[in-house]
């Protein structure tokens, strides 16, 4: 494989939790500084080296009643000053996939040759709002889903029941996803929940939307930010000896409302985006060593096993039962703990997936390290899968 | 947050009468309906402009999947309540269930449209628009009535 054109030279991330004492800008600056330090291993990187910024945020506009967050961030980190050439910061919104789409845009900016170094951040601060469901339901069709009482949780439940009906997927298999992700999250110092749980804990937790319970879902309230610095590959080695390459990145869409799809047990946006990245990178799923998937609800990880091509449609439940996707399994899913245990600061999630993948590919993921990982895949979806964005990353050993 | 009455008003056909659009070229059905004069079929696109017919969806259908929302509902929604994907033959739509025993819901259950029924009021002080929507209730089949009667007798 020849050297891909786009590399990641630095990553940073805040701990994910309810940050009562920190504002959205505070979180962004914290993750940004960490990424800048991380990108300064050989030569110090400065604000004036950065050509463009992208910011993934889903709900901050409604939560804080503040839009125009691009310049707000740019100003605080000195990107909106004469010294840093007043660079543009583009805000990207694609519901839960905002972070992944912001990364996608940054990738395109470098890939096109127009820019040499780009910074991409994702952030969300959900704890500043009470009764967040009204706002998170805006990832659905407001008039024909949310207005009838459809919530992200309820829509996941509709998909779950259908999957159980068509493929005999069991309640226990779904619970195993949460158990596995909590097991992995235990080893992630930045995860919101670092607590191992049992199948019983999941099955005894409160019913949210029949048949899914509290422990089937990512936490309701997560705050956090993540930042990644991308560079033209030819420039990357100036800053780091260990660049991580972006093999491919692709996004796809589906109908906003679940009821407008041909079937309810497959996310066509994920299938399409996966097809595109495998083709662009000229690899098959077999080559992938680990996946950071969008397990907003346990069912979405089962769908990911199938829609990303690791098992046949309907076999997702069996895959977790047979421990195919545990840390020591054939294809580990969510070594970070996933949305379930790492937390789901919506706009930050897609970038946090990239951060985790970079740590894995550098061999720096400590207790949750996937042995010998060379190629990683991230899957970030919005709403019930109306958008999906998938990235394939690799380290130098894969080339 | 309050939306303007106009936003609500322009959806009344779909909400109160289950209006949908049918492409007269390929037969595809869309719910809610597309704008009558400019709407397009997603398959036939430009060719279908002016050829989309407004129809009413059948009032009877079958539950494809359902869920009972018990928690994490938006404000203004009193739990528990049930929503379902309902196959109305020509089109599957999301519907709110009403007049039903939540424990008896199942995939394949036959339901019929009733209403429009009151969904709730907008705004925290309930000073906004009162929203209505068509809802769906189970149709008891003869066999189910028989089982219920037997239970009552026992
Ligand atoms: Zn047509």
Image (spheres, rainbow, N blue to C red):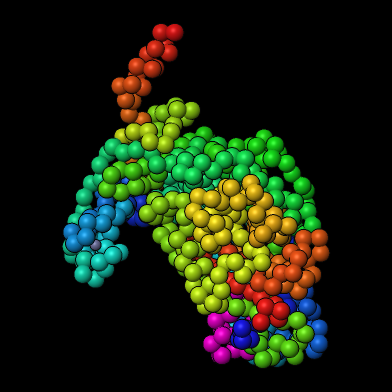
Q: In the rendering, at what x and y percent does residue A342 appear?
A: 71, 57
Image: B95 above or below A120: above
Image: B26 above or below B92: below
User: In the picture, which quadrant includes the N terminus of chain A?
Assistant: bottom right
Asked if residue A66 can be seen in this view, the reply is no
Ligand 1 in which quarter: bottom left
- The residue depicted at 78 percent of the width and 71 percent of the height is A363
Q: Nearer the viewer, residue B133 or B46?
A: B46
Q: In the rendering, at what x and y percent does residue A172 appear?
A: 62, 40
Q: Nearer the viewer, residue A234 or A34?
A: A234
Q: In the rendering, at what x and y percent does residue B39 appear?
A: 26, 63
Lateral position of residue B77 relative to residue A243, left or right:
left
Tag count: 0
- The residue depicted at 56 percent of the width and 90 percent of the height is A113
Q: Nearer the viewer, residue A390 or A115?
A: A390
- The residue depicted at 27 percent of the width and 54 percent of the height is B29
Image: A144 above or below B142: below
Which segment did they paint magenta?
A101-120
Q: Image quadrant of residue A390?
A: bottom right
Q: Nearer the viewer, residue B108 or A207?
A: B108
Q: Image quadrant of residue A192?
A: bottom right
Q: Within the magenta stretch, is there residue B89?
A: no
User: In the picture, which quadrant includes the C terminus of chain A?
Assistant: bottom right
Q: Within the magenta stretch, is there residue A102?
A: yes
Asked if residue A265 can be seen in this view, the reply is yes
As drawn, the residue found furthest toward the top would be: B154
Q: Image quadrant of residue B113?
A: top left
- The residue depicted at 30 percent of the width and 64 percent of the height is B42
Lateral position of residue A156 relative to residue B20, left or right:
right
Lateral position of residue B52 relative to residue A300, left or right:
left
Q: In the rendering, at what x and y percent does residue A256 appear?
A: 43, 58
């Amino acid at each position: 494989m020849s050297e891909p054109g786009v590399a990641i030279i630095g990553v940073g991330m805040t701990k994910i939790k309810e940050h009562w004492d920190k504002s959205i800008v505070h979180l962004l600056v914290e993750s940004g500084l960490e990424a800048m330090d991380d990108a300064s291993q050989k030569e110090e990187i400065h604000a004036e080296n950065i050509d463009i910024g992208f910011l993934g945020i889903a709900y901050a506009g409604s939560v804080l009643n503040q839009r125009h967050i691009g310049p707000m961030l740019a100003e605080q980190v000195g990107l909106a000053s004469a010294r840093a050439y007043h660079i543009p910061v583009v805000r990207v919104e694609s519901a839960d996939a905002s972070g992944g789409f912001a990364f996608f845009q940054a990738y395109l900016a470098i890939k096109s040759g127009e820019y040499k170094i780009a910074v991409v951040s994702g952030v969300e601060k959900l704890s500043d709002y009470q009764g967040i469901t009204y706002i998170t339901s805006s990832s659905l069709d407001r008039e024909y889903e949310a207005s009838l009482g459809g919530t992200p949780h309820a829509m996941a439940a509709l998909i779950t029941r259908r999957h159980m009906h068509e493929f005999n997927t069991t309640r226990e298999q779904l619970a195993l996803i949460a158990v596995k992700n909590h097991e992995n999250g235990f080893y992630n110092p930045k995860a919101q929940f670092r607590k191992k749980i049992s199948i019983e804990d999941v099955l005894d937790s409160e019913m949210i939307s029949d048949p899914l319970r509290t422990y089937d879902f990512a936490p309701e309230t997560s705050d956090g930010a993540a930042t990644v610095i991308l560079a033209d590959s030819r420039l990357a080695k100036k800053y780091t000896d260990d660049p991580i390459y972006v093999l491919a990145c692709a996004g796809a869409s589906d109908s906003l409302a679940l009821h407008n799809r041909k079937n309810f047990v497959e996310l066509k946006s994920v299938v399409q985006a996966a097809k595109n990245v495998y083709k662009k990178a000229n690899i098959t799923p077999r080559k992938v060593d680990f996946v950071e998937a969008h397990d907003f609800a346990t069912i979405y990880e089962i769908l990911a096993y199938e829609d990303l091509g690791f098992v046949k449609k309907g076999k997702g439940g069996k895959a977790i039962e047979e421990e195919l996707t545990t840390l020591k399994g054939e294809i580990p899913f969510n070594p970070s703990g996933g949305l379930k245990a790492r937390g789901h600061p919506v706009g930050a999630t897609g970038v946090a997936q990239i951060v985790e993948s970079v740590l894995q590919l550098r061999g720096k993921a400590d207790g949750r390290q996937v042995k010998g990982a060379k190629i990683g895949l991230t899957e970030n979806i919005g709403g019930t899968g109306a958008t999906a964005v998938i990235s394939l990353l690799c380290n130098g050993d894969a080339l | 947050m309050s939306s303007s009455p106009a936003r609500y008003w322009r959806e009344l056909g779909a909400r109160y009468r289950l209006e949908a659009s049918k492409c007269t070229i390929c037969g595809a059905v869309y719910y809610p309906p597309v704008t009558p004069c400019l709407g397009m079929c997603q398959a036939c696109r430009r060719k279908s402009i002016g050829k989309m017919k407004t129809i009413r969806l059948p009032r009877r259908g079958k539950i494809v999947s359902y869920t009972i929302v018990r928690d994490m509902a938006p404000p203004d929604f009193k739990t528990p309540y049930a929503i379902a994907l309902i196959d109305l033959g020509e089109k599957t739509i999301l519907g709110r269930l009403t007049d039903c025993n939540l424990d008896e819901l199942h995939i394949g259950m036959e339901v019929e449209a009733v209403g429009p029924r009151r969904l709730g009021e907008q705004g925290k002080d309930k000073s906004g628009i009162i929203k209505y929507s068509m809802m769906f209730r189970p149709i008891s089949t003869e066999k189910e009535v028989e089982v219920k009667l037997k239970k009552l007798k026992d």
